[in-house]
Image (spheres, rainbow, N blue to C red):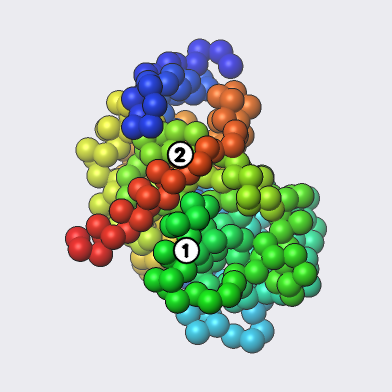
């Protein structure tokens, strides 16, 4: 790892830590693209520009169709559309990461999840290494109140949402929706918390991290949150990008590139400007798995998160959520 730069980062949960990035880069940035609403037509213009600026990111996909229909996501493409599959293959060839967003846009029992993972492997030569839960799919892993590890928080969320039993069953052995064993075997990273800020070192410097009770997930990570183009433009303000650069932070932004980033084949001009600003900075622009692997292998992350740190992270998420309601 020659010519790595060192930046002193002050985080809120411990003393200053040194973060080095490969090739003398000053900070790390990537995008985790949730495939909801994505079609070949509305995301290709975004990826064309990302590629042109040398920003390699992570795109989630749904490998198989949803013949029963979907009220909210019917318009999105799956890998069963030939032209879209070809486009995703090109993305993989260009160095973008292709990740798993579940088998398809609605709940899948184990047989469909297995079919989707095998289809993925057949197309891309290996299983996906990164997964992100989708909407209200029942095979989601540790979702609903089970996202919270801290007992009193979990209990409160369960009461607040009036969740009686466990609706999300991806991690429940013996259920029709169970695929936790396959997650454990193939998936290295699963996203959990999201925060309205760019630098995850300021919120979750330990990431990726283990949670002993969530035995079907190898490592969890957190991301910034910008659900659509408007939120993305607000979050990626010049000021925030400059700050990320200055503090040497690590940023993964969860967004939906299918939600307004391109219209009539053209990328939104404000988004293009953001990509342009990033491209002239000394950022390390690699897909999420590559970035997380680096944090584990070089920075020694990937350890178990203690109960106190877990509670702080969960509380912080809740406080941000509540604040956003009143904003
Ligand atoms: Zn989704």
Q: Residue drawn at (27%, 32%), measured in percent from left and top?
A: 243
Q: Residue 327: tell me if it is visible.
A: yes
| Residue 322 higher or lower than 164, as above or below | above
Which label belongs to residue 309? 2
The image quadrant where one finds the C terminus is bottom left
| Residue 260 higher or lower than 97, as above or below | below
The image quadrant where one finds the N terminus is top right
Give percent across and percent down for residue 69.
Answer: 59, 85
Give percent across and percent down for residue 168.
Answer: 60, 70
| Residue 106 higher or lower than 199, as above or below | below
Q: CA distance from mark 1 to mark 2?
A: 18 Å
Q: Earlier in the sequence, mark 1 or mark 2?
A: 1
Taking depth in this image into account, of 39 and 170 the one nearest to the observer is: 170
Q: Secondary structure at mark 1?
A: helix
Which label belongs to residue 155? 1
Q: Residue furthest bottom?
A: 68
Give percent across and percent down for residue 76.
Answer: 53, 73
């Amino acid at each position: 790892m020659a010519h790595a730069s060192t930046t002193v980062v002050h985080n809120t949960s411990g003393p200053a830590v040194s973060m080095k990035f490969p090739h003398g880069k000053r900070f790390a940035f990537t995008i985790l693209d949730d495939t909801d609403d994505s079609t070949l037509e509305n995301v290709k213009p975004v990826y064309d520009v990302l590629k042109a600026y040398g920003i390699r990111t992570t795109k989630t996909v749904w490998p198989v169709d949803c013949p029963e229909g979907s009220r909210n996501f019917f318009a999105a493409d799956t890998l069963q559309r030939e032209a879209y599959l070809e486009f995703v293959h090109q993305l993989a060839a260009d160095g973008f990461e292709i990740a798993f967003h579940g088998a398809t846009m609605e709940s899948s029992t184990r047989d469909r999840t297995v079919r989707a993972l095998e289809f993925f492997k057949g197309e891309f030569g290996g299983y996906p290494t990164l997964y992100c839960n989708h909407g209200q799919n029942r095979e989601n892993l540790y979702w609903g109140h089970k996202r919270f590890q801290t007992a009193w928080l979990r209990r409160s969320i369960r009461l607040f949402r009036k969740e009686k039993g466990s609706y999300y069953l991806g991690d429940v052995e013996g259920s029709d929706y169970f695929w936790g064993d396959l997650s454990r075997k193939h998936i290295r990273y699963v996203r959990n918390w999201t925060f309205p800020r760019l630098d995850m070192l300021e919120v979750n410097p330990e990431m990726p991290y283990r949670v002993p009770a969530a035995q079907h997930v190898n490592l969890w990570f957190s991301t910034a949150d910008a659900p659509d183009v408007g939120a993305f433009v607000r979050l990626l303000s010049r000021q925030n990008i400059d700050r990320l650069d200055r503090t040497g932070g690590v940023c993964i932004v969860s967004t939906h590139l299918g939600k307004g980033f391109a219209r009539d084949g053209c990328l939104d001009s404000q988004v293009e400007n953001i990509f342009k600003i990033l491209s002239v900075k000394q950022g390390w622009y690699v897909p999420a798995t590559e970035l997380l692997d680096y944090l584990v292998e070089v920075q020694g992350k990937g350890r178990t998160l203690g109960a106190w740190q877990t509670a702080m992270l969960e509380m912080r998420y809740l406080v941000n959520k509540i604040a956003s309601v009143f904003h």
